Amino acid sequence: MATPQHELSDPPSDAISAIKFAPASLQLLVASWDKNVYLYDTSESGGTLLRAYQHRAPVLDICFGDSDQDAYTTGLDWDVRHLNLSTGDQTVLSSHTAGVKSLAYSSQHHILVSASWDSTLKIHHLSSIPSPPTSIALPSKPFSISLTATKLVVAMASRALHIYELASLASSSSSFPQTTDSQPRTATPISVEPWQRRESSLKFMTRSVACMPNDAGYASSSIEGRVAVEWFDPSPESQARKYAFKCHRQANEQGIDVVYPVNALAFHPVHGTFASGGGDGFVALWDGVAKRRIRQYQRYASSVSAVAVSGDGKLLAVAISPGFEDGREGIGEGVVKIFIRELGENEAKGKGMK
């Protein structure tokens, strides 16, 4: 790349809800409120829009499956879909009874988890012959989910947070008869006890949660300009390490701090540091172990709605969309953008690392 950062051409026409890199390439999948999913090749400056996939309603989340050609989408049409990126074919795997906020795929257990505002999780067991999905009732609406190789973190309303063991979710969902029916199946309600129940360290509504790549813990963010870092280990010594800090706050002309939501979090797969994106238009890199900010990038023209790091850790994708923090409504032409930043060898390395 000629420059450290470039803007993708042909961005979505409405707000961006999620961005994800492919597991084995530099292709980027983008979900938008304009009812489309977009696939870009980000390997060259300016990028290339490879294809757009139309949906029935705004798309709220996306994720890749085992390959760069398999993706899953969901949103305000209440459906969870498999999307073949090569052919464009879409298959409905299940339907919730309200909008679906989040998706996460476990390659280790071959299960897809969807989290809906109907206060349920649905577990889709994606073996060669799919099983009917199973459904787990939640105590409140889920706002964000994230997983590691062994655990699923579900952040919900009322500051509730559940941590599930993926092996338990996979074994519970795979115990039901398999089917060759291509139509979505009615989910079977099951009861799976969370491995841990926690109360969020953040006093206000959770906006995002992201798990550490080393399976040790997670970070969460809130609408009140704070990020919390916690560890899974339930021992008193480990729990004493958890902390929260203020961020994404900017002083106004009167010198008063204006608090912005922290909309997005993404961990670096190699260094274990993480990026945060806020309603203030800034993206910052953090060393969660050393409790230090590594760097903050230049301010973007509008709110940062999503961030993602490529699987090789060399690219940082930043999506900006008006978040209406300034009180203005409506999205004008040319204000929704996606930037790809090439990360230097040590750019995202923690302060305590050598």
Image: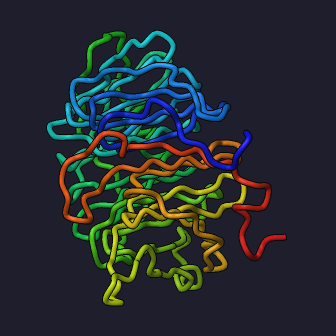
Residue drawn at point x = 49 percent, y = 51 percent: 307
Kindly indicate the quadrant of the structure image that contains residue 327.
bottom left
Q: Residue 32, position in %: x, y?
A: 33, 37
Visible in this render: residue 24? no
Question: In the rendered view, would you say 253 is above or below 92?
Answer: below
Visible in this render: residue 177? yes
How is the structure coloured here? rainbow
In this orientation, which residue lies closer to the viewer: 201 or 123?
A: 201
List the single residue furthest toward the left: 97
Q: Quadrant of the C terminus?
A: bottom right
Q: Residue 285, position in %: x, y?
A: 60, 66
In this orientation, which residue lies closer to the viewer: 53 or 100?
A: 53
Residue drawn at point x = 33 percent, y = 84 percent: 253
Horizontal placement of 340 versus 172: left or right?
right
Q: Quadrant of the N terminus?
A: top right
Horizontal placement of 126 versus 44: left or right?
left
Question: In the rendered view, would you say 95 is above or below 259?
Answer: above
In this orientation, which residue lies closer to the viewer: 41 or 103?
A: 41
Residue drawn at point x = 58 percent, y = 25 percent: 68
Q: Residue 255, position in %: x, y?
A: 36, 90
List the single residue furthest toward the right: 354
Q: Residue 277, position in %: x, y?
A: 46, 61
